[in-house]
Image (spheres, grey):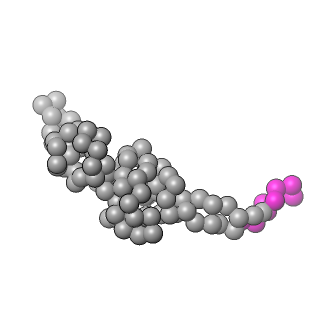
Amino acid sequence: MLKIKENDKVKILQGKDKGKVGKVIRVEPSKDFVYIEGANIIKVHTRSKKQGQPGGIISKEGPIHISNVSVVCPSCGKPARMGFDLKDSGDKVRVCKKCGGQF
């Protein structure tokens, strides 16, 4: 089970976009990749698909390995490790290891 989910705020720890903070757009659990809004921008050359549709160069977000990002805690505002806690109702909740706040 991955600890990072869509719409989480994360900070990039390594790579060309080190230090940037952004929102997770997509997660690929099979490959351990995340796609972060505005980070690791790559250019893709596309071919025209139909007669009226032109081809060109499109900029889009590329994958970043999940080990190179850290979740930013909403309560303390710092990148922190995450743990899990069981509530009395039996629900599993993500918890910040620094401040104890919930995600």
Most common secondary structure along the magenta stretch: loop
Residue 45, percent from left and from top: 69, 68
Q: Report the front residue among 103 and 79.
A: 79
Residue 102 part of the magenta segment: no
| Quadrant position of residue 61 | bottom right
Q: Residue at x 16, y 30 (%)?
A: 89
Q: Is residue 49 magenta?
A: yes
Q: Check the image and name the residue furthest to the left.
A: 88
Which residue: 20% across, 46% down? Answer: 96
Residue 73 is at least partly visible in this image: yes
Q: Considering the image in quadrants, where does the C terminus appear?
A: top left
Left or right for 100, reference 54: left
Q: How many marks?
A: 0
Quadrant of the drawing holding the N terminus: bottom left
Residue sitting at x 37%, y 46%:
8
Q: Is residue 35 left or right of residue 1?
A: right
Residue drawn at the location 15% of the way across and 34% of the way down: 87
In the displayed image of the protein, which residue is found farthest to the right? 51
Q: Does residue 36 appear left or right of residue 13 in this picture?
A: right
Q: Is residue 23 above or below residue 43?
A: above
Look at the picture and state if 56 lies above or below 8. below
Residue in the foreground of this view, choosing between 77 and 58: 77
Residue 93 visible in rendering: no
x, y percent for residue 73:
28, 45
Horizontally, residue 100 falls left or right of residue 52, namely left
The region drawn magenta spans 46-54
Task: Return the x and y of residue 95 as percentages of the image width and height.
Answer: 20, 43
